[in-house]
Image: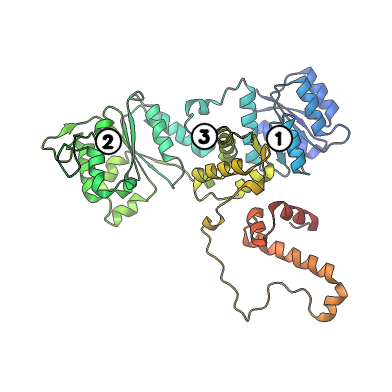
Amino acid sequence: MTAILVVDDELSMRQFLKILLEKEGYEIALAEDGPSALKLAEERTFDLAISDIRMPGMNGLELLAELKNVCPELPVIMITAFASPEDAVTAMKNGAFDYITKPFNVEEIKGVIRSATARKNAGSPPPVEEEFPEIIGQSPEMLKIFDLIKRIAPTPANVLIYGESGTGKELVAKAIHNHSRVADRPFVPITCSAIPESLLESELFGHVKGSFTGAIADKAGLFQQADGGTAFLDEIGELTPIIQTKLLRVLQEREFMPVGSTRTRQVNVRIIAATNRILEEEIMAGRFREDLYYRLAVVPIRVPPLRERKGDVPRLVEHFLKKYSRLLGKEVQTISSYGMEVLMQYDFPGNVRELENIIERGVALEASNIILPESLILSLHRQGRTPEPEPEPDHAPLFVAADDEEELFERGMEEILVELEKKMIRHALERADNSKMRAADLLGISFRSLRYKIKKYGID
């Protein structure tokens, strides 16, 4: 059982973490201060330590340094209700695994703990990640997909993967191929919408020399290249009716005819298709063949959008941080808790692909070794919300400073401005569905400034 040391001077926080983590199957030891924690660390072995920063006597940063002397390989997660970039940078430089602010997101801290304990255990990843290195995720939604992949991969059944753009449908297709009995055979992908309609038939089925202008030699198509392996047809909903008919013949008869040829060729290939369209609606509209749909969708798999599996966001962020720190020659090790909070509140209309782009930009822009919210650029205009109508010119003003001039001067400029600022912040938070990042953009101030003002004015 994984043993975790929790250090916090607040009894309620110690009890909360103990209940939360014991439900996850961890063994928990509690310490109310630094010296008590050090004594426990000297007496027994822990797989992880979670420590508050602001504590009387020995603070969390001092405890971190002492724990690293006693147990150099022990991952330590720092938590605090008084976050500051300086503390975050200091903690990370001194060897902290991560830095999280209170109140923290439960799924976020679970994800960080899983990552930390996996790294501690001789770098051994959890079994799911070992089986499916192509896909990052351990949320319940993804675990169901992994289980389905393991059950269908050894069979020759055709698969239809559907989901929004950017969810990782091709990764799921590759995982099915890699766990199949033909994993050593070719996996040949093709994006149907990326090829001009006039060339798509040739790309899929090949052509013979002289079959059309420019056909100077015989060419093997997708199915011939994938013979004995797997053909992945992405954006299958884009196929024309003629191509759909020819594809149906491949599925039914296991044969095809190259463009310009007079003889058919046999093929043994598994077809995995993917689409971001609702093919049932395409069938009703007469744009997709119903018989082809049932041949393709022997096993349908829905890949959920990232907003439905937010628990995977911390793990994905860690993966992309490592990837782009290496590619861009940076040493960005983690993301601040503020930054993670911003991401956990975001809907990701572009899904995992958008998250990857956000982290790549963040690593490129960040000058320190920790990504702060200022380095996160989100596509706010893609939230899909209908803009609220502008008030008519004769409507009452949104914010009233005082009922009359007498009250205005009686209360004074400072009090009036404070009151207006509070009203603007509350209104911006309401417009932004309580997303602090979007509210800061509406107000034209930095995320950090908004956090400060919310705390200063006690705005709930």
Q: Name the image colouring.
A: rainbow
Badge 3 vs badge 2, beta-carbon distance below 8 Å: no
Q: CA distance from mark 3 to mark 1?
A: 27 Å
Q: Which residue is mark 2?
A: 222
**Mark 3 crowdedness (10 Å alpha carbons): few <14, some 14-19, many ≥20:** many
Residue drawn 25% across the image and 39% down it: 204
Residue drawn 76% across the image and 56% down it: 453
Say which amino acid is labelled 3.
Ile
Is 429 drawn above or below residue 64 in the view shown? below
**Res 446 quadrant in image:** bottom right
Residue drawn 71% across the image and 24% down it: 74
x, y percent for residue 370: 67, 39
x, y percent for residue 10: 82, 38
Q: CA distance from mark 3 to mark 2?
A: 28 Å
Q: Quadrant of the C terminus?
A: bottom right
Say which amino acid is labelled 2.
Leu
Rendered image: mark on residue 136:
3
